Image (cartoon, grey):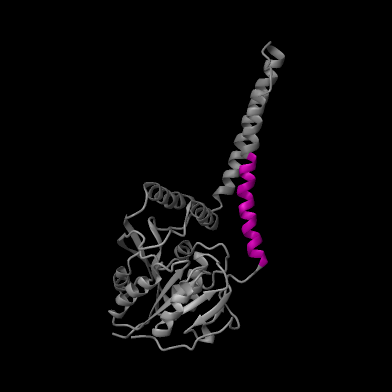
Amino acid sequence: MKQQVISVVVPVYNEEAVVFESYKRLTGVLKALPDPYELIFVNDGSRDATADILRRICGTDPAVHLIDFARNFGHQTAITAGMNYASGDAVVVIDADLQDPPEVIPAMIDKWREGYDVVYGQRAKRKGETFFKRFTSAAFYRVLQKLTDVDIPVDTGDFRLIDRKVCDALKQVKERNRYVRGIISWLGFKQTGVEFDRDKRFAGETKYPLKKMLRFAFDAIASFSYKPLKLASYVGVTVSITGFAYLLVVVYEKLFTTMTVTGWTSMMAVSLFFNGVVLMMLGIIGEYIGRIYDEAKGRPLYVVRETLHVSGAEKLTGGEPAPAHGREGRRHPLAA
């Protein structure tokens, strides 16, 4: 069987407590494979010692590549950069926190060799997570599936394997507010899943607190559905009809009865309710307009400060060829 290169992309942000263990686990799995591999760490502007640890690893292992961002550009952007730099026939994306076990990668590769272009990891169990996190995550995936016309598998994250042709197709997608797993589903191709039990975080803290989770959820919905905008229309019509009906009641009471409302309590309650609805709808519309503004600016998706073990031909900024940023290490051959 012809050898095929496996690229593994690992986005990292403030992961000094776990990044070396992640490297060891991944290397142990990849060395057991019959094919050559490359391990691409994308440092997303970490403020701790993560970048220094990765530089030391690169100094001892030619199969490890480092892409160091000039600042924090976000998890989804870091994944995109890693895919842009990857040269393998298959590209695996996995987080550094070891919640997604590297030992699942061989099973993904087996599915890929069967002819699947995308093999996503599907979580059967989620260890070490609160009931609130599990409930909201399950609810999000199911709501997203109802809101969009894209078949995005439930209970999946960014842990997946994609074929080279999928990776090349993904490079053609230029949008700024990215939801990578959704984009991959939108691209199509032949997909399947591999179930696994998600482990608790090996060390460190989650990089997705509630605020970021909510932002990520809305990014996903706004990227693949315009139904929230339709909701604004529906709510507007409903509120208008309700307000008109209430107006008829008030006119009737004034002309044909002696019932009159004294005081401002009911009026203020109705006014605040309607104003709240209007502001909520304006907020939804504003989110979409903000995304249009981001796209119109045309700024690079990310800026690279430094690379190690990456050739100049592979250097990309936001998916387009660009001159080198900072110092650059020599490209080493892929490890067997």
Q: Is residue 86 visible?
A: no
| Residue at (46, 52) in percent of width and height | 144
Q: Is residue 325 left or right of residue 60?
A: right
Q: Is residue 196 above or below residue 164?
A: above
Q: Is residue 51 visible?
A: yes
In-front residue for pair 244/202: 202
Magenta part mainly helix, strand or loop? helix
Q: Can you give x and y, in whole percent of width and height, for residue 111 in the image?
A: 31, 70
Report the quarter where the C terminus lies: bottom left
Report the quarter where the N terminus lies: bottom left
Q: Can you give x and y, in whole percent of width and height, for residue 179 in the image?
A: 50, 61
Query: Which stretch is magenta?
Result: 278-297
Residue 276, image quadrant: top right
| Residue at (61, 71) in percent of width and height | 300
Residue 157, image quadrant: bottom left
| Residue at (48, 89) in percent of width and height | 330
